[in-house]
Each structure stands twice: as structure tokens, then as C-alpha cells.
Amino acid sequence: MNKPLETIAVARDEDGLRLDRWFKIHFPDLTYGRLQKLLRSGQIRVDAKRVQSNTRLEGGQQIRVPKSAREAPVAKPSVRPPAGVSKADRRLIEELILHEDDSVLVLNKPYGIAVQGGTGTKRHIDGLLEGMTDRFGGRPRLVHRLDRDTTGVLLIAKTRKAAATLGRTFQTRSAAKTYWALVVRVPRPAQGKVEAALVKVSGPDGDRIRKAQPGEQDKAMHATTHYSVIEAVARKAAWVSLKPVTGRQHQLRAHMDLIGHPIAGDNKYKSDWNLADDTIEPKLHLHARRLIIPHPDGGKSLDVTAPLPEHMLKTWEVLGLDANRFDADRI
């Protein structure tokens, strides 16, 4: 007869691994929701103590796991049809998850996929999430957005209440957002603030954001961005940290172009520049690196960091930049 419980020792090379990541490796069929229930009821314990999914493990610790964790989940009907979402699309969303709990989901958005649908845009993050209501237990809701070619931290609410709370947080500018970018030439001074009201104008290449002109105050959007040079590449380029105070469309791209330092790979805002090196991909080098925001359920703030996308990592390597040089909480 199988025992109702088993105890598994944490391997030495798993030291520092989060508990939820450990379960994803050792119990791939155990869903996040079931893991949370087992933790809340105390059926999963580490060294006989109750723990949370984000607990960091230490080599040699003993994890108590109930027999039910190995049992195949019982299939439940979807809340609604999967809206044409393929298995590959569902797997993509799972692979992008940086953080998940009962109220919020944080994805590491990849390059080249829109967050929301529009004219001619059929495949987008919002649509993929809508087709996974069976997985998330409801309709996930976007609470902020990133441009199609911007990568990094994307926050999504899993409940209506969380969406309303997070929406108010963004409106009151209580969310701290940090972006990393590679810009043309090196900004002087090395730290500064860009304050320029912006307006949207239409053109043959689509909508574009520019500085408001006299007489356009009625439709201008106030926008403020703080920038800081992390590391310069001779005088040709700079790795910069960007912290927007406001959240206007294309704000960072327009502001950096306005001060003469457009973001590398941004063809809409003047930068088709590629350092005359064909090993650097002509893609937008703008990444939503970190988000700190009060959790909608109260308690400790949500603090999530996203690793650089592949094309930016390759560029960092070509330019001799070390993406791991600084801790996430320093820049």
C-alpha cells in the first residue's frame, strides 16, 4: 500500500530555488492552484513547517508532499471555449509566468507580440489569456500595457476586484516602473529628467507621439521621465535606466528621441542605427525590467523583475555589457 505522504530532500544544487519552481520541476502535473490549496491546508510542509509558494529552499531541507500531488488532475470543463488557442499558445503563456497568486499574474512579455487586439492584429496576449479561462478560473484582465516590440514585466489581474484596485494604483502613480534600454550616444548629464507634454498625430506609418506645439495644450498629455546612464559604450551608445512618472503611449521612446538619444532599433523614432555591426539585431531595445506595486490584497508589495530578452542579451554580449552586474534593487 502506498503511503499517504512522502518526504523528499532538497538537493544541494537546488539551494535558493523557490518552492513553486521546485514543484514545477519535480511535479510538472501539479497545477499552481492545487499547489496553493495544499500549502494553505498545511499538507505540504518544509522541515515540518508551513510555508508559502515563494519560500526559498535550502539544500538538505525535507519537503513533505501528500500522495495526491502525484495524482493526475481531474479534467474540468472550460468556463468558455478556448477561442482557438492552441496547445503551443497555452504552453507559451505558462512559460512566460514570472509570478502568480490568487489575484494577479505577471508575465515576461516577449518581443513582437501585441498586448491587445486592433486593426489587423488577431494574435495577442489578451486573446491568448481569454482562451485560458479554464486555467485561471476566470477572465484575466489587463491593467496596463506595453508596446508590441517592448518586452518585460506585464501585470494582469485575475479577478474583477484586483483589476479595479490595480487600476486605481496606476492612476494615482503608486506603481514604480523601471525600464532598461540601449540608446544612441551617451546622454549628458548622466542623470536627468525629461518633462515634455506629448500629443498623438497620425501619419502614413501609423500613429506617432511628439512634443506638443503652441496651441495644442487642449489635447496635450503631461509626461515625465527620469533617466540614468548605467554604462556607456565609448561615445556611441549607453545602457540606461528609465523611470516613467506618467504612463503615456510611447512616452519613453518619444522622450529619449526628443533629447537626441533615441532607443536602438526604434525605427518609428529615428533609430535605424545598429552600431554598424550586423550581429546586433534591428529590434527595439526597450525592456520593462522591474515593477513594484502594492498588492491588491494588501500586505507586502509585489516586486517582480524580468530577465532581458534574447536579442538584448546578444547585444549586451557584443558590446561587452554585463546584464548581471547589478542587483535588481539597485537600478
Image: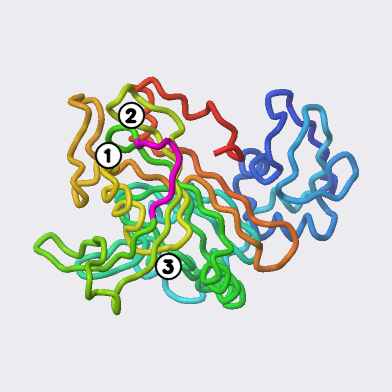
Closer to the N terminus: mark 2 or mark 3? 3
In terms of image quadrants, where is residue 47? top right
Q: Dots 2 and 3: beta carbons under 8 Å?
A: no
Which of labels 1 and 2 is toward the front? 1
The answer for how far apart the CA atoms under marks 3 and 1 are is 34 Å
The mark lying in front, picked from 2 and 3, is 2
Give the residue displayed 21% in from the left and 50% down from the top: 269
Q: Which residues are magenta?
A: 187-194
Q: Position of residue 229 (x, y in %)?
A: 43, 35
Question: Badge 3 is on which residue?
Answer: 131
Kind of residue indicated by mark 1: Ala
Disc 1 is placed on an element classified as: loop
Residue 252 in the image: above or below residue 115: above
Kind of residue at disc 2: Thr
User: Residue 264 shows which numbered tag?
Assistant: 1
Q: Is residue 220 left or right of residue 43?
A: left
Labels 3 & 1 near each other (Cβ < 8 A) = no
Q: Between tags 3 and 1, which lies in front?
A: 1
Mark 2, Cα crowd under 10 Å, few <14 / some 14-19 / many 20+, is some
- Asked whether, in this view, residue 54 is left or right of residue 271, the answer is right
Among all residues in the image, which is located at the extreme left? 204
Residues marked 1 and 2 touching at CB (< 8 Å): yes
Task: State the separation of the CA atoms marked 1 and 2.
Answer: 10 Å
Q: Nearer the viewer, residue 213 or 85?
A: 213
- The residues tagged by marks 2 and 3 sit, at their Cα atoms, a distance apart of 35 Å
Residue type, numbered disc 3: Gly
Could you say whether the residue bearing mark 2 is in a helix, strand or loop?
A: helix
Q: Is residue 235 left or right of residue 97?
A: left
Percent position (x, y) of residue 289? Answer: 48, 45
Q: Which mark is residue 315?
A: 2
Residue at image point 37% right, 23% down: 317
Location of residue 265 with respect to 80 vertically, above or below? above
